[in-house]
Image (cartoon, rainbow, N blue to C red):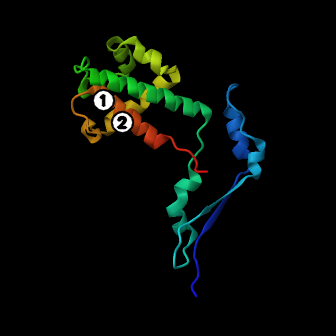
């Protein structure tokens, strides 16, 4: 008769884990509950026919264990980013903004004026519907600029339309920056 080798990782939180986000929260944010310190989560590693050291077992489950929580504020930000992506996608699809090429967008990003440029080009409904905050604009500008310096537009399968490039940037950011802990 064989053995079932499977690592179990138990995650418990210490008081500073609760104190830290509560110290950062704004008035409208929900407080991180103090009783969360007593909560324990157990994550099971994959089955193996052989005993595995903890570091090897963690390689397989680390994302489930260590991904961070999204606050309500972050969720609302994602919603605004998604609404922006939908509006930019619609503008790109209309054909009326084909003059906004990836090169134009990258140039505006390099000069930190992409939102001013887009405000002058796109209908006001784009901004009314997306309801971006100043924080959103600042964060998106910073991240889009970084992406424009790190990636070629063709890596996002975009060659002709700068608005399509911005949509791809938003989707890439959401996929890579935002995650929720599995329950």
Q: Which residue is mark 1?
A: 164
2 vs 35, left or right, is left
Q: Secondary structure at mark 2?
A: helix
Between disc 2 and disc 1, the foreground one is 1
**Please, is residue 159 above or below residue 120 in the view?**
below
Give the residue drawn at x 40%, y 36%: 171
Q: Quadrant of residue 158?
A: top left
Residue 84, given in percent of the width and then of the height, sits at 42, 25
* Residue density around tag 1, few if under 14, some if 14–19, many if 20 or more, within 10 Å: many
* Most foreground residue, 108 or 91: 91
In the image, taking residue 160 as reference, residue 23 lies left or right, namely right
Q: Which mark is residue 89?
A: none
User: Percent x, y for residue 119?
Assistant: 37, 14
Relative depth, front residue between 25 and 78: 78
Q: Secondary structure at mark 1?
A: helix
Is 130 on the left-hand or right-hand side of 75?
left
Does residue 149 appear anywhere in the picture? yes
Please state, as top left, top right, bottom left or bottom right, where the N terminus lies in the image: bottom right
For the point 45% across and 43% down, which residue is it? 176
Report whether residue 108 is seen. no
Estimate the x, y position of residue 58 in percent, counting from the top left. 54, 63
From this view, report whether residue 40 is shown above or below residue 161. below
Along the line of sight, which residue is nearer the eye, 63 or 44?
A: 44
- Vertical side of 103 occupied by 118: above or below: above
Q: Categorize mark 2 by other alpha carbons within 10 Å: few (<14), some (14-19), many (20+).
A: some
CA gap between label 2 and label 1 equals 14 Å
Q: Position of residue 137 (x, y in %)?
A: 46, 23
- Residue on which the image places disc 2: 147
Q: Is residue 178 left or right of residue 33?
A: left
Vertical position of residue 100 compared to residue 173: above or below: above
């Amino acid at each position: 008769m064989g053995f079932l080798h499977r690592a179990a990782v138990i995650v418990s939180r210490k008081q500073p884990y609760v104190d830290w986000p509560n110290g950062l929260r704004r008035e409208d944010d929900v407080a991180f509950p103090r009783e969360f310190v007593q909560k324990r989560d157990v994550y099971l590693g994959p089955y193996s026919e052989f005993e595995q050291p903890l570091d090897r077992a963690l390689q397989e489950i680390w994302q489930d264990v260590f991904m961070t929580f999204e606050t309500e504020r972050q969720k609302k930000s994602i919603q605004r980013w998604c609404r922006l992506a939908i509006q930019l996608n619609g503008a790109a699809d209309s054909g009326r903004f084909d003059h906004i090429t990836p090169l134009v967008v990258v140039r505006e990003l390099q000069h930190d004026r992409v939102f001013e440029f887009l405000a002058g080009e796109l209908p006001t409904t784009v901004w009314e519907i997306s309801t971006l905050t100043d924080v959103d604009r600042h964060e998106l500008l910073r991240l889009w600029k970084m992406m424009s310096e790190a990636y070629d537009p063709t890596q996002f399968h975009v060659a002709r339309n700068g608005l399509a490039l911005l949509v791809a940037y938003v989707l890439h950011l959401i996929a890579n920056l935002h995650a929720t802990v599995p329950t």
